[in-house]
Amino acid sequence: MSLEASNYKKAQIANMEFGKVSPVLTTTFELRLFSDIVDLDGVGTELSNTGYAPKQITNNLTNFPSTTDGVKLNAVAIAMDALSEDSDEVQSAGLFDADTDELLYRKVFSTPFVIASGNYYNLAIGDLKFSAV
């Protein structure tokens, strides 16, 4: 799942590169699912189905090992909790900073999908892909 940088993240990168403004580093990410396309400012309709909750992901080298080729991948599987009812149609996902509630990255799914009751959204090892190239 290649991710697109949000307006907030693009501003952080620009300010860091041009002006030497140190970014505030994220300690915990939150993976959130949306029934519409979350915009690059983080505005969208998050799922509210029974059993749905954002998934918190610790930002560390165990979950996201160092890279030498400009491509960063998750090294552990990331599984959200199982839903108690069928989800609304999932059109996009957002990776937020859990502390600031800012959208960092988003993914718009080319084929929206429904998560059936008793199932969960799962990202296998390598599914989260951040690329500087």
Image (spheres, rainbow, N blue to C red):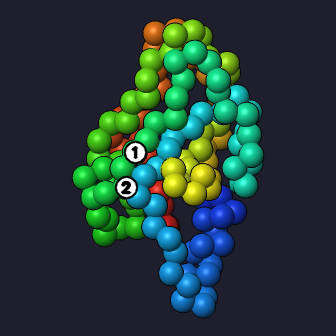
Q: Residue furthest left?
A: 62
Identify the element where label 1 is drawn: strand
State the residue position of label 1. Answer: 57
Q: Are marks 2 and 1 in contact (CB under 8 Å)?
A: yes
Residue 7, picture quadrant: bottom right
Res. 81 in view: yes
Residue 105 is left or right of residue 44, and the answer is left
Residue 77 is left or right of residue 101, and the answer is left
Residue type at mark 1?
A: Ile
Residue 56, picture quadrant: top left
On screen, residue 107 above or below 84: below
State the residue position of label 2. Answer: 59
Identify the element where label 2 is drawn: loop
Quick one: 70 or 92, which is closer to the camera? 92
Q: Which residue is pictured at 35% across the width and 67% down the height?
A: 69
Whole-percent x, y for residue 103 in the image: 62, 53
Residue type at mark 2?
A: Asn
